[in-house]
């Protein structure tokens, strides 16, 4: 396998080193990354604001996500609905997402709409409107989103309970969408304060990828974005999660066809030197049907319908979360026991060389795949800039991956996947009488 | 990246910002045993996407065995003459390759994506799975049991489950689309290994097989390898398509209420007869549906989300399968607002039928559909492979892409509004609601003289 891997890594390096990016920092502190790609006559424009649910406090949980919605509800020049109306009639579409750490606005449009997009983005960053009637209506929209993704979703409801138990102090413990009572109660003052705090140009990285030239982007940025005044970014998040000193368990009983289980371990922030070894560990355990947990739980023992693992990018120490759906009739405790046995196995002996190589190959080919589209490139560039501190680290991804040894994987598994650092959440189905 | 930059300059000429996009060049040949081979070289990433498409799909499932085509596709990787399921997965993962096998209304698609330099090994796996699967008894039992659990688990997510209830109620059990495409706990329990062997023997035949390759490769080298790997397929017979049976508009409305007593939100869909993929009305309808429920500023989303805050999202989908399908409104709202939201959706439907769309709206829809098309259909090898598959399965020519913008431009306000009036009606609708029946039953009753009710815990997705 060695020669295969070397070839692969050569290909990886050759590719990633050639992702050409031009940067510019405006006088107000806003940083802009441009990647020219003329394959199709379209552009992906991504704005990363360094504000998310970690910048909230009790009583206003979910307000960052609410702002993600409010940013489409009108500003000074482009009033209510106009952002979407103008965008769609010019052949574009948009979305946005909020996480614990960032709020990201994602615009996709034909190159002919480039100047319009700069004008509209600048308008809402500088002069967002706060119309009480629109705020009330949007509150209803977000409440519906919460009912969709949490209250009426077994995985959403269980995940919320898991995080609330895994964190006792740090803001990562509350849901990004917010508690329902906070969604129903935040005030106009809360909203104004939060906007002022998060939407400083110096708190934003803009990535433009696609059928543009760095020169035209620089000109438009100077014209539309540079006049927006700089102001204070959000204050540092002071609270640090104290070390966990023993397993925590949560049970959620609700009507469901099948049980569900999630197991979380605290891991360091994405910029930490152990991050890449943890990525490899995750792939060994759950990536593909030859992974350890799939083979054991889904295939051999047939205790679970599926098993997966996720480690979201994070600015503060985050989580590695295993999700598993026990089979109908299978005892969730047995499935959990089998999963933990596999974790103990990976903590007690080095992963064989061939298996390590397989995991690296999987991660590297996935990395390629995330670069297939201009949208994928824009997102990845922004993530590297925000979470790893420098977009140029994207070009070093393959080399960093190659450096991970079996000893590194054994060490991080031993350090982070232990009983003391574990939180287990289990959804146990309960019957409910039919409605009368 | 020098290579990409050089290529990009060429492509920029091929895709001017002007009036029309073009499908990149590809070749099509037919092997002696009937296998169609379509190849489109792309040079941007060192990856190759390979797809095998079999005509048939869910349409070809025997009526009592819904899910057979889908289960057969899943089992291809689970043991062949030369490999166990475990060995196959190991080999696939060592290449960092992806694998997907699924069925839609009219075809089964098996896809693999891998690094171009791994062609020989990847093609070995691909052909082995498609042409020489062993369907070991133990794997058959395992897959069927997992599928049965999955079809139950789907009910824990009402946003997804409502679509599974809608189809049988809308199309009826005798229509090929009226059966659960992936099977349900009732039909899956009836499937045996013999059914799977028989289905594979009939359907995975040269005359029913289309191979599509898109990505980085040398055409001169790939063609003979594909021909060699697939010359082993028996010619067999092409699948004979089922006769076209369009869903009929009822003389009055019908309603199915699925009781999920713990739901705090009601999910509902409202459907009526639409078109086949190959219908001449497709382009005007695509534009009208974009305006009615196909984008953020659509009439439905504007009324139910933006104006009233009743929901996180409201849309209308225009089904485009080989057989005539539906036009289906879909949204959800808190239990207490169910009636208000349904009324509001019906108001929008009435408004569209009565007033049609304006010239300004039509121009906006045209720009929207054209502006996004390159990112949806022409950017990646997967998207291009999907487009090539559509051309083959639906029997369309490359004009489908090369003249698309021209055809969009040709839609007049009059043709758009004829389509709006003809297809967006308010009578004979099919309603499906998933929610707390105890709280919404009375409101639901006002929409249809005929109302059926089923508990979400009852097996399957249709009323017995």
Image: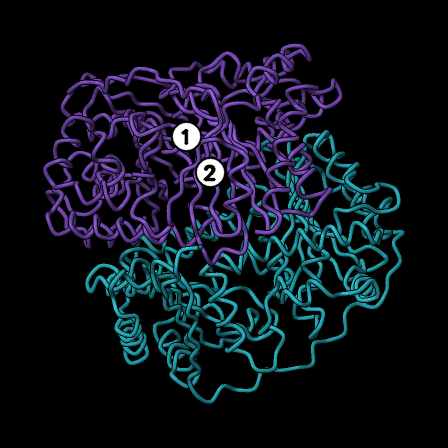
Chain colours: A cyan, B purple
Q: Residue under circle 2?
A: B432
Q: Which residue corresponds to the image point at 64% horizontal and 56% vertical from the top-left?
A: A143
Q: Are marks 1 and 2 in contact (CB under 8 Å)?
A: yes
Q: Which residue corresponds to the image point at 52% horizontal and 17% vertical from the top-left?
A: B282
Mark 1 or 2 closer to N-term?
1
Location of residue A284 in the rendering, given as x and y in whole percent from the top left corner: 34, 65
Q: Residue under circle 1?
A: B170
Depth check: A284 or A397 in front? A284
Q: What is the chain identity of the residue bearing mark 2?
A: B
Q: Within 10 angstroms of label 1, few (less than 14), some, or many (20 or more) residues?
A: many
Q: Is residue B114 left or right of residue A13?
A: left
The answer to whether residue A216 is visible is no
The answer to whether residue A147 is visible is yes
State the separation of the CA atoms marked 1 and 2. Answer: 9 Å
Q: What is the quadrant of residue B346 in the picture?
A: top right
Depth check: B389 or A32 in front? B389
Location of residue A84 in the rendering, given as x and y in whole percent from the top left corner: 73, 38
Q: What is the chain identity of the residue bearing mark 1?
A: B
Tell me how many marks there are: 2
Q: Is residue A326 left or right of residue A113?
A: left
In the image, residue A192 above or below residue B237: below
Q: Is residue B394 left or right of residue A71?
A: left
Q: What is the quadrant of residue B105 in the picture?
A: top left
Location of residue B354 in the rendering, given as x and y in whole percent from the top left corner: 67, 19
In the image, residue A399 above or below residue B359: below
Q: Quadrant of the C terminus of chain A?
A: bottom left
Number of the label disc, if any, that sits on residue A302: none
């Amino acid at each position: 396998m060695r020669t295969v891997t070397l070839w692969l890594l050569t290909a990886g390096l050759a590719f990633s080193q050639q992702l050409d990016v031009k940067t510019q920092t405006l006088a107000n502190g806003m940083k802009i990354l441009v990647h020219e790609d003329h394959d199709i006559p379209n552009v992906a424009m991504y704005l990363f604001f360094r504000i998310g649910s970690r910048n909230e406090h009790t009583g206003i949980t979910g307000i960052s996500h609410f702002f993600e919605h409010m940013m489409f509800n009108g500003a000074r020049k482009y009033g209510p609905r106009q952002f979407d109306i103008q965008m769609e009639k010019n052949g574009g579409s948009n979305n946005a997402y909020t996480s614990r750490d960032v709020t990201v606005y994602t615009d996709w449009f034909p190159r002919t709409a480039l100047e319009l997009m700069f004008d509209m983005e600048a308008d809402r960053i500088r002069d967002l409107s706060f119309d009480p009637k629109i705020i009330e209506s949007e509150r209803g929209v977000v409440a519906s989103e919460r009912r969709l993704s949490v209250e009426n979703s077994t995985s959403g409801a269980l995940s919320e309970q898991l995080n609330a138990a895994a964190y006792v102090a740090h803001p990562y413990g509350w849901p990004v969408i917010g508690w329902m009572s906070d969604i129903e109660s935040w005030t106009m003052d809360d909203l104004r304060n939060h906007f002022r705090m998060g939407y400083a140009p110096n708190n934003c990285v803009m990535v433009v990828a696609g059928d543009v030239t760095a020169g035209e982007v620089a000109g438009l940025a100077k014209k539309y974005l540079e006049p927006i005044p700089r102001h204070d970014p959000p204050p540092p998040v002071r609270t640090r999660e104290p070390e966990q000193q023993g397993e925590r368990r949560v049970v959620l009983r609700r009507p469901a066809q099948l049980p569900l289980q999630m197991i979380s371990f605290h891991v360091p922030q994405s910029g930490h030197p152990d991050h890449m070894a943890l990525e490899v560990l995750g792939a060994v355990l759950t990536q593909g049907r030859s992974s350890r947990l799939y083979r054991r739980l889904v295939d051999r023992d047939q205790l679970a319908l599926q098993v997966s693992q996720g480690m979201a990018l994070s600015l503060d120490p985050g989580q590695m979360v295993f999700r598993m759906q026990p089979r109908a009739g299978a005892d969730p405790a047995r499935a959990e026991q089998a999963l933990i046995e596999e974790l103990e196995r990976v903590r007690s002996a080095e992963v064989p060389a061939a298996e390590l190589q397989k995991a690296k190959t999987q991660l590297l080919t996935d990395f390629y795949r995330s670069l297939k589209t201009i949208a994928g490139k824009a997102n990845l560039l922004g993530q590297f800039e925000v979470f790893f501190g420098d977009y140029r680290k994207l070009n070093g991804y393959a080399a960093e991956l190659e450096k991970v040894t079996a000893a590194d994987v054994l060490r991080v598994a031993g350090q982070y996947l232990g009983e003391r650092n574990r939180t287990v959440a289990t959804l146990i189905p309960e019957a409910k009488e039919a409605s009368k | 990246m020098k290579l990409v930059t050089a290529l990009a300059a060429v492509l920029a000429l091929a895709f001017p910002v002007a009036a029309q996009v073009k499908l990149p060049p590809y070749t099509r040949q037919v092997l002696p045993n009937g296998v169609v081979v379509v190849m489109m070289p792309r040079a941007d990433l060192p990856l190759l996407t390979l797809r095998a498409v079999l005509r048939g799909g869910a349409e070809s499932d025997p009526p009592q065995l819904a899910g057979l085509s889908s289960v057969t596709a899943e089992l291809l990787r689970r043991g062949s003459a030369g490999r166990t399921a475990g060995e196959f997965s190991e080999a696939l993962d060592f290449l960092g390759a992806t694998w997907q096998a699924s069925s839609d209304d009219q075809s089964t698609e098996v896809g693999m994506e891998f690094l171009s330099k791994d062609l020989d090994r990847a093609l070995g796996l691909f052909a082995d799975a498609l042409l020489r699967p062993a369907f070991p008894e133990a794997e058959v039992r395992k897959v069927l049991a997992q599928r049965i659990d999955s079809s139950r688990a789907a009910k824990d997510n009402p946003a997804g489950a409502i679509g599974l209830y809608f189809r049988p109620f809308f199309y009826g059990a005798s229509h090929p689309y009226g059966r659960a495409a992936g099977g349900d706990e009732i039909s899956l329990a009836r499937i045996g290994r013999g059914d799977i062997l028989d289905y594979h023997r009939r359907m995975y035949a040269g005359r029913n097989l289309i191979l599509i390759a898109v990505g980085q490769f040398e055409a001169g080298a790939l063609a003979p390898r594909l021909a060699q790997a697939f010359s082993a397929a028996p010619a067999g017979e092409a699948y004979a398509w089922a006769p076209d049976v369009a869903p009929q508009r009822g003389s009055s409305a019908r309603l199915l209420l699925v009781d999920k007593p713990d739901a705090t939100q009601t999910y509902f869909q409202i459907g009526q007869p639409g078109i086949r993929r190959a219908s001449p009305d497709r382009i005007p309808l695509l534009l009208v549906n974009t305006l009615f429920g196909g984008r953020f500023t659509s009439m439905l989303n504007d009324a139910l989300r933006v104006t009233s805050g009743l929901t996180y999202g409201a849309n209308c989908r225009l089904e485009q399968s080989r057989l005539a399908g539906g036009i289906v409104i879909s949204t959800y709202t808190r239990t207490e607002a169910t009636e208000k939201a349904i009324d509001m959706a019906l108001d929008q439907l009435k408004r569209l039928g009565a007033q049609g769309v304006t010239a300004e709206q039509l121009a906006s829809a045209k720009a929207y559909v054209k502006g996004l098309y390159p990112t949806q259909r022409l950017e990646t090898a997967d998207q291009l492979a999907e487009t090539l598959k559509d051309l083959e399965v639906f029997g369309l020519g490359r004009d489908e892409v090369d003249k698309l913008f021209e055809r969009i431009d040709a839609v007049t306000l009059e043709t758009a509004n004829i389509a709006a009036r003809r297809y967006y009606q308010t009578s004979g609708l099919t309603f499906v609601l998933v929610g707390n029946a105890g709280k919404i039953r009375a409101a639901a009753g006002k929409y249809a003289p005929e109302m059926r009710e089923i508990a979400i815990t009852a097996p399957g997705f249709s009323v017995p």
